Amino acid sequence: MKKILVTGGAGFIGSHTCLVLLQKGYEIFVIDSFINSSRKSLKNVLKIVDEEKKSSFSKKLKIFEGDIRNKELLEEIFNKSRSDGNGNGIEGVIHFAGLKAVEESVNNPFLYWESNIFGSINLFDVMHKNNCHTLVFSSSASIYGKNQTGKIDEYSQINPINPYGTTKMVIERLLEDLQRSFNLTWRIASLRYFNPIGAHYSGLIGESPIGIPNNIFPYITKVAFGALKEVRIFGDDWPTIDGTGVRDYIHVMDLAEGHIKTLEYLFDNKPNIINMNLGTGKGFSVLELINTFENVNNLKIPYVFNSRRSGDVASLVANNSLAKKLLNWEPNRSLRQMCKDGWKWQFKNPEGY
Ligand SMILES: NC(=O)c1ccc[n+]([C@@H]2O[C@H](COP(=O)([O-])OP(=O)(O)OC[C@H]3O[C@@H](n4cnc5c(N)ncnc54)[C@H](O)[C@@H]3O)[C@@H](O)[C@H]2O)c1
């Protein structure tokens, strides 16, 4: 089976994707600096898959602690992959590693350009030199401009409004250049995620933000647990069904499965570059999310309204028809399931990992 390098594989989306890769039989090499994650996530991934398959998968998951800005380490991983097992090296990369806090990126754009862009240049260079040209890149819906109505398709205006989104746009541009310059070589997919939430149903892996969460869902789960007092809802006067912002929430396991489908699509097709939305195509308001969470888990979530935050938009919902068509992929876990699984993770792991 193919060997896959997963950068940032210990993180929220990375750990769920590693689980699906192992379930499908891939051998994985993970590089992670653990700047926003813990080794325990991957230990628990092994726990889940060992239990499911009734055998040990530890030999199929190799973990390297380090930063993607460290080229020597990346080289070492590619070399090790060739001296291992069948002698074939890493054939594909899923690139999650990166910083993702919007506010931090506004306060420290140098850090975001350095870490996300320089790290990605390093990675792509080492891939190229090692003749590995299949890449799935974690982009983001935050690259889309904010003055858009209706569902967002891949041809919608690109106009990020913060340094985090800019780094994703710049990396996409770099990948387009690589594809143009070496057009018979690279197979690339930039996946533009909408709002991944929830957790694996076991409650063994999930989102474990360090400090106060930036995103609404882990904030809700912390309020549910009593670690935070109330959810702050930014704006009650948006032009939406109830005045609160509408977002496209996608279960992290649907997202993880989308990555494996994408990787397999790339392996099975001619060199190409695809920019693709991964979302459910359904929008829910903040109040609908809170109500669903309360109903499913039989809990009360206190909330208050604050004024709108600058840079927020009324609604951000994916047109996901490209992914459905190309990948034969369907996100099928409901908002209720996301709320149930996300709460189970938080309840079982109040302090995270
Ligand atoms: N979670 C979301 O809402 C969301 C939405 C859109 C896009 N994305 C993107 O998806 C990717 C994964 O997101 P996530 O939610 O799993 O985040 P995460 O922070 O949980 O995971 C990122 C992982 O990368 C590691 N990392 C960060 N910088 C690194 C570096 N320079 N070298 C090595 N490792 C490094 C972190 O330790 C972490 O394990 C990120 O690139 C993020 O920008 C996330």
Image: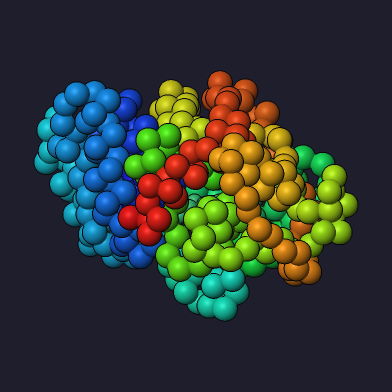
Residue 212 at x, y percent in the picture: 51, 67
Q: Report if residue 131 is visible in the image.
A: no
**Of 161 and 47, which appears nearest the observer?**
47
Where residue 331 appears, as percent x and y from the top left, is 57, 29
Residue 100 in the figure: left or right of residue 282: left
* Image spot of residue 211 (x, y percent): 45, 68
Q: Give the residue displayed 69% in from the left and 34% down from the top.
A: 281
Residue nearest the viewer, comparing 116 with 219 = 219
Q: Nearer the viewer, residue 62 or 182?
A: 62
User: In percent of the image, x 24 and y 37: which residue is there?
Assistant: 47
Q: Residue at x 47, y 74 (%)?
A: 111
**Residue at x 62% of width, y 63% of height:** 230
Q: Is residue 224 toward the left or the right of residue 71 in the image?
A: right
Residues 163 and 75: in front is 163
Please say if 149 is above or below 114.
Answer: above
Q: Quadrant of the C terminus?
A: bottom left
